Image (tube, grey):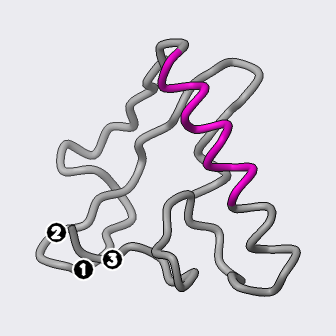
Amino acid sequence: MVSDFDPKQGTLTINKARVGGIDKDSTKTGEDRLIRLCPRALRVLTRQLALRDAFVRTGKIAHDHLFFKETGEPIRNL
């Protein structure tokens, strides 16, 4: 989710899980994790957010997922 990314701190918060295609409101351990991104990952995520913003402006997406398909649909299954 977009709200899980803190660009100023360069971190992602992991506080949800997907198990068997079903979204859960907590991680498997029940504990949130804070991931500090390396500079390269931060650059990739910054570019992804710019692409996401362009999709939002053109009405291709109306969700808060960070990653999505070319169609704008959120990625649900890997």
Quadrant position of residue 7: top right
Residue drawn at the location 64% of the way across and 54% of the way down: 2
Asked if residue 62 is positioned above or below residue 65 in the image, the reply reads: below
Which stretch did the figure color magenta?
40-51
Q: Secondary structure at mark 3?
A: loop
SS state under label 1: strand
Prevalent SS, magenta region:
helix
Which residue carries the number 2 mark?
A: 19
Are the residues flagged by discs 3 and 1 in contact, CB closer than 8 Å? no
Residue most extreme to the front: 70
Q: Identify the residue at horizontal 69%, vertical 18% (top origin).
A: 9
Query: Which numbered disc, 3 or 2, marks the residue closer to the eye?
Result: 3
The x and y percentages for residue 15 are 42, 47
Find the distance from the CA under tag 3 to the CA under tag 2. Answer: 11 Å
| Badge 3 or badge 2: first in the primary sequence | 2
Q: Nearer the viewer, mark 3 or mark 1?
A: 3
As displayed, is residue 31 above or below residue 65?
above
- Kindly check if marks 1 and 2 are in contact, taking CB atoms under 8 A apart as contact: yes
Q: CA distance from mark 3 to mark 1?
A: 9 Å
Q: Amino acid at mark 2?
A: Val
Q: Is residue 63 left or right of residue 38?
A: right
Numbered badge on residue 22: 1
Decide which of tag 3 and tag 1 comes sooner along the chain.
1
In x, y percent, where is residue 61? 68, 82
Q: Amino acid at mark 3?
A: Arg
Q: Which residue is mark 3?
A: 76
- Residue 43 included in the magenta stretch of the image: yes
